[in-house]
Image: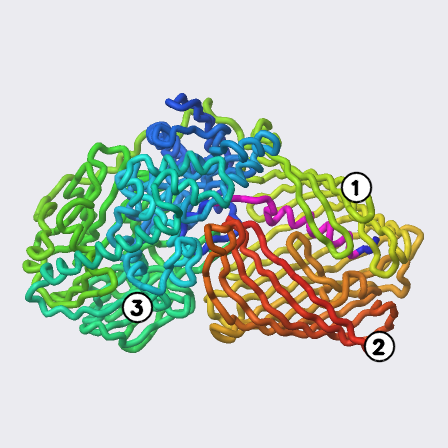
Amino acid sequence: MKSLRFFSLTLLLATLALVDFNARVYANDSYLPSGISRPESTESGAWMTKKHSMQTSVGEFKFEIHFEEINEVFAKRVLDVLVNDAPKLFDYFRYVPEWTVHFIVDGATHANGSATVFPTSIIHLNNFPPLGMEFLSSEEDWVRGLVVHELAHIIHMDKTTGFFKAIRNVFGSAGKALGSLHPHWFSEGLATWVETEFTHGGRLRSNLLLHTTQERLLDKTFCQEVDCLDEPEHFPYGSFRYWIGAMFLKSLEDKKPGTIRCLFEKNAGRTLFFLNKTFKECTGFPDVARAYQTFRMAQVEAISKKRGQVSRDLYKLKVESFKLPDSEFASDWQRGFEVFNGRLYHVQFKNDERYIVERDHTGQILRSRQFHLPLNQIQTQTKFSRNKGKMIISLRELHGGEQGDADVVRRWISWEPTNDKVEKLDFKHDPLYVFQTDDNNYLTISYEYNRWVARIVKGESEEKLFDLNKLDFLSQPMFDNGILTFKSFSSNRKNGWAWHKLNIQDGDHRIVMQRNRPFEYVMSCGSTEYFRTFDTPSSKKIAGLRREGTLTFLLHPNDPDHGHLFDSKCTDLVKRLKLGDITNKTSKGELFEREDVAEGFNKDDLDNYPNLDQFVPHYWYLQYLAGDNVEIYTVETSVSDPKERHKFYLAGQYFSGVDESSPVASYNYSNKGYVFGTNYGKYYSLSAVQNATESSEGAATYMGYGKTWGYWSWLPLVQYSKIITSDWISKRNVASIRISQELSYKRTFTNDLIQGFNLKYIGTKYDTKRRKDYNGHAARFDMGLKFNQTFYSRLKGTFETLEKSDLSSGVIYGGGHEGIGYQKMHEFYGLSYSSLFGNEIYTGRFQLGAEMLNPYTAGGGLLPFYFKEVHALIGVDVAKSDYTFIDRTFLRNRVIQSYHAGARFDLTLFYNIPASIDLLYAQVQNPVGNNLNEFITVVTGKFVP
């Protein structure tokens, strides 16, 4: 068999170390699009496990918490939440997970979590709080909200009955993975409803979130079908599945208590096509579409009825109301907004990118501005920064992953709107809030080792002001006239919500107000500070409020598609908005003293991580793969610890057409960027030149270390392999040492010209038995370009050479195309794999694409096929090799080319598989005979969270 066949096999097995090909059903709670890779914790130290079990009204709940020493206090809080809150969920759903649930505490720099039931029940929890005006901040007991949300996913996905229970009994957790394929709006909506229903906070209690979602619902062009909630074309993209999904399910539950439980129970044993039947039985609606349309119309009607309240609230004020943009240019209020020097600044989407928009006092847009990195948050401004005309803004840079699972690094800038001057602000630590207090002096607040820390930064020097108790939550910080004010929440105090004032000159730090229920700062008037709770009258009148002097910007919850700018004395505003239920005037309060409770666990109650009892198989399943010349049927399973630091993969393969079978086995270790592994496999195929069976059998050992710098990544890999190949050319036994270097870049902005590129070099030393040793070199370049919203292109080039003259000791093959589950180094449309061969191959491809249609619609009747975009494709392939087999003729050292044209269909299959299907017509230019014509179907995609 061809050496490149084996190289493809070993690289595929090596890739198991880096990419999880197993079907996962993550539930990502992030404002960024979902990703596929998970960064390792940036902390160091021993990992430990806390095992626990408890009896509930519906059975025993067993779970394990895995954490590093630095995150022990967070893990202890997770245990407390599970003991106190999990039984409430089990009681409502009348179900407890059958298997042990693993909670993994991750070190990260953004608020997020995920849940999967495959290969076993695993929850990842990021030890990082929500920030600023992010909707997640509505749950100030953020650890509780995070745990409850993710546990709701496990309950939902774990329960299987009927058909899926039978599959689970045979195939293990593969049955759970199949049974948990639901529309995302159903699974995420359920979990988001749970986080609100069973806690003091939750996103559905955020007026700003409701304003944002209702703004979209009023847009008649946006998500008229329920299927659209999973993947709208425009903002808020995948977040809509959380927000509207939860609102939709809540409306059904409010109408008939127990409806969500009914949907959960009856759908646990039904296949993808029977959600309509479940809705009919539980809600009385004939199908999901009718239920959603009723909900949507009710929302729009309710908004229309309440609009009159807006004019009454703002009566006699000279209000400038402006229409908020449509879905393609939507406002992202959770990224912050400020009235600054007589102008309104807020974040708005334009062509799928965030911009800062500047409006005058009438609401007219004066300009939009984008910086060198994507916007993260408009910071609350200080009196000093206003006087200097400098806005403090944070930008977002992704490190070590892809979108939703990447670590977020905040980069701070000072922007002067009057002259458009931008100054980068550098800090030794990673601040989450920054306030300018004086020339070149800043007050920063960061989250470090489970606690909030405030510092005064003067040039290169830093001085700590205070730090809060571990896991206390800090929000709504503001700074003016030497006083820092902020709100905190502590799960250890009876009156857990507190309002703080800190004088940075003398260090006097006091709690001036405490309450046993959540509250929110609204505004100050004179010496009085005004607050509200979720159920005070003012909550029905304010979704968002910013003031500078008398100039006021108001987002009114009853007018979600308008913003309102007006001049008003603060006393008039207090009266009109019915503020005053919760106030703080001149209270001195009490001195703040840090009182950390007893931290961590009894060390005797902890186990080392990992444990041998974690390495048990949880599943096996069958897989089918259509190769170029052979069909492969695979039975496979894997065994790993919950973090997949150690992973064993076992498979048996049957190759139809040649009637052969073989085993595949691999082990991989991955931790903090380091990878090490070994594998064995044997591969059979039919020769394209002769109708004979070919084979490649070998083993490999590899190690490497991946590194990232912002949007750049580098992966060096060293591999030793031994291959026994039998093909139509020869039978050979070759050992090799391979060194590869791979450099990748991912786009910063959606509309960047360079969307990304990958450059890879492989150098190999071949040691052959009874033949002369030789060296090999290979390189690949792949780059994507985007010219505008419609046109884009892809450039790809490969080169490979073996430093020898004969073919008997090894050969390179090319041709064919990639597909799901397999990759090719040297692609060429129109010729099958192995039609290009020799000691040297060059290939190149230029492809031009154009987006023609973007229906973003489902197949109808909740069929799990979601049609997103249709593209037109044209391109050309060029190749040169020592030998080309074309139309039963061998060509020597000839350049050949093929042209292709067709259409690409971007789909989402079964709610979790983004796939592209290319239907192409290819014509190979034969320099010595008739051209070859071929119709090609290229399917690419991956199962993603």
* Residue 45 lies in the magenta-colored region: no
Q: Are marks 2 and 1 in contact (CB under 8 Å)?
A: no
Colour style of the rendered protein structure:
rainbow
Q: Is residue 70 in sight in this rendering?
A: no
Q: Are marks 3 and 2 in contact (CB under 8 Å)?
A: no
Secondary structure state at the residue bearing disc 2: loop
Secondary structure state at the residue bearing disc 3: loop
The Cα atoms of the two marked residues, 3 and 1, are separated by: 60 Å
Q: Quadrant of residue 801?
A: bottom right
- Towards the viewer: 100 or 705: 100
Give the mark toward the camera: 2 or 1. Answer: 2
Locate residue 685 relative to residue 218 in the image: left or right: right
The crowding category of the residue bearing disc 3, from other C-alpha atoms within 10 Å (few below 14, some 14 to 19, many at least 20), is some
Q: Residue furthest right?
A: 770
The Cα atoms of the two marked residues, 3 and 2, are separated by: 59 Å
* Residue 13 lies in the magenta-colored region: yes
Q: Residue at x 70, y 42 (%)?
A: 634
Q: Residue furthest front?
A: 286
Q: Which residue is mark 3?
A: 325
Q: Residue at x 16, y 48 (%)?
A: 532
Q: Which residue is mark 2?
A: 929
- Which span is picked out in magenta? 4-26
User: Amino acid type of disc 1?
Assistant: Ser
Q: Residue at x 18, y 50 (%)?
A: 521
Q: Which residue is mark 1?
A: 661
The Cα atoms of the two marked residues, 2 and 1, are separated by: 39 Å
Locate residue 188 relative to residue 141 in the image: left or right: right
User: Amino acid type of disc 3?
Assistant: Pro
First in sequence: mark 3 vs mark 1: 3
The crowding category of the residue bearing disc 2, from other C-alpha atoms within 10 Å (few below 14, some 14 to 19, many at least 20), is few
First in sequence: mark 3 vs mark 2: 3
Give the mark toward the camera: 3 or 2. Answer: 2
